[in-house]
């Protein structure tokens, strides 16, 4: 049985309904778009209730002809504290270039492939594999839709590309004095749009969209870093810098 570890980081999320330990309704899969980069790094599965026993042994990543991709995942099950979200890592040694595992076994995914994730032989999601993505989220390129003062309308931020499926909480809004604005955030449109609904009507004034430096995309590229880029020794313990975008509510 694969070892279980607690994990609270970002992930690509697969939402599965479970009934008495089995899979119920059709799952909601993230990345919810039909494309993933060839250097896809993480997959997470969200169950409706805690699951007993190993799940990794029941999963497979299949080629378009139905053949299984050999050993695509690390043999670890990383669970959220409540036991409902399972995060799987595609073998980093086969994702990152220049490492022995990639040289010996080859990459897991390559551009042009069509792959499916299956659980107990049941298809969960099908993807077309795009070229490697080495560019993390570009916050300056995000488009912030205006909101009106006195209204409780949602603020919609169109991203430059999909981010990690569990990244909604890595973005927040603060007022001019730095106080966080209460509300609910969610990702939509293939994780390429961040939608924030405030708990109270907007007040006029200046606000900050604050993006944590640890926000990643599905390939592990951060806002202020790249999965393929090694950190300098003096920077290895430094916290990634957040990025701020100012906007005004009228």
Image: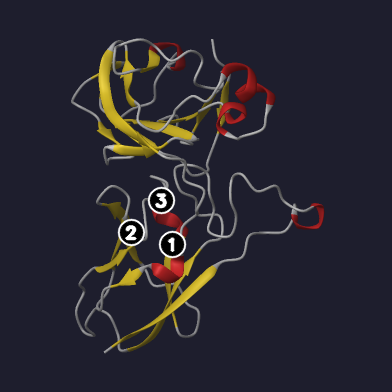
Q: Where is residue 141 in the image (x, y as percent from the top left)?
A: 40, 68
Q: Label 3: which residue?
A: 163
| 163 w.r.t. 13: above or below | below
The kind of secondary structure element at disc 1 is strand
Q: Nearer the viewer, residue 144 or 151?
A: 144
Q: Position of residue 222 (x, y in %)?
A: 54, 53
Q: Which of marks 3 and 1 is in front?
A: 3
Q: Label 2: which residue?
A: 185
Sequence-wise, the earlier of marks 3 and 1 is 3
The quadrant in which the C terminus is found is bottom left
**From where the camera sits, is residue 19 visible?**
no
Q: Which of marks 3 and 2 is in front?
A: 3
Structural distance between the alpha carbons of marks 3 and 2 = 14 Å
Q: With 104 as the anchor, is 28 left or right in this view?
A: left
Sequence-wise, the earlier of marks 3 and 2 is 3
Structural distance between the alpha carbons of marks 2 and 1 = 8 Å
- Residue that sits furthest to the front in the current view: 112
Q: Label 1: which residue?
A: 171
| Callouts 2 and 1 close, C-beta under 8 Å | yes
**From where the camera sits, is residue 106 visible?**
yes
Residue found at x 49% / y 85%: 177
Residue 180, by quadrant, is bottom left
The kind of secondary structure element at disc 2 is strand
Residue 195, by quadrant, is bottom left
Sequence-wise, the earlier of marks 2 and 1 is 1
């Amino acid at each position: 049985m694969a070892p279980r570890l607690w994990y609270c980081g970002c992930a690509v999320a697969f939402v599965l309904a479970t009934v008495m330990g089995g899979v119920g309704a059709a799952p909601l899969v993230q990345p919810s778009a039909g494309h993933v980069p060839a250097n896809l790094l993480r997959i997470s599965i969200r169950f409706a209730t805690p699951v007993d026993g190993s799940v990794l042994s029941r999963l497979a990543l299949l080629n378009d002809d139905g053949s299984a991709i050999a050993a695509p995942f690390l043999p670890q099950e990383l669970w959220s504290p409540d036991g409902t979200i399972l995060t799987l890592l595609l073998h980093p040694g086969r994702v990152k270039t220049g490492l022995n595992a990639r040289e010996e076994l080859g990459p897991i995914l390559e551009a042009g492939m069509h792959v499916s994730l299956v659980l107990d032989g049941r298809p969960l999601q099908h993807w077309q594999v795009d070229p490697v993505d080495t560019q993390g989220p570009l916050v300056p390129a995000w488009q912030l839709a205006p909101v009106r003062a006195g209204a409780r309308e949602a603020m919609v931020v169109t991203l430059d590309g999909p981010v990690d499926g569990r990244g909604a909480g890595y973005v927040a809004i603060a007022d001019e004095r730095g106080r966080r604005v209460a509300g609910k955030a969610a990702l939509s449109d293939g994780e390429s749009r961040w939608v924030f609904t405030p708990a109270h009507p907007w007040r006029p004034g200046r606000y900050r969209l604050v993006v944590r430096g640890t926000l990643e995309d599905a390939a592990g590229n951060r806002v202020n870093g790249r999965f393929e880029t090694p950190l300098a020794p003096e920077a290895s313990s430094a916290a990634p810098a957040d990025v701020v975008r100012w906007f005004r509510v009228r």
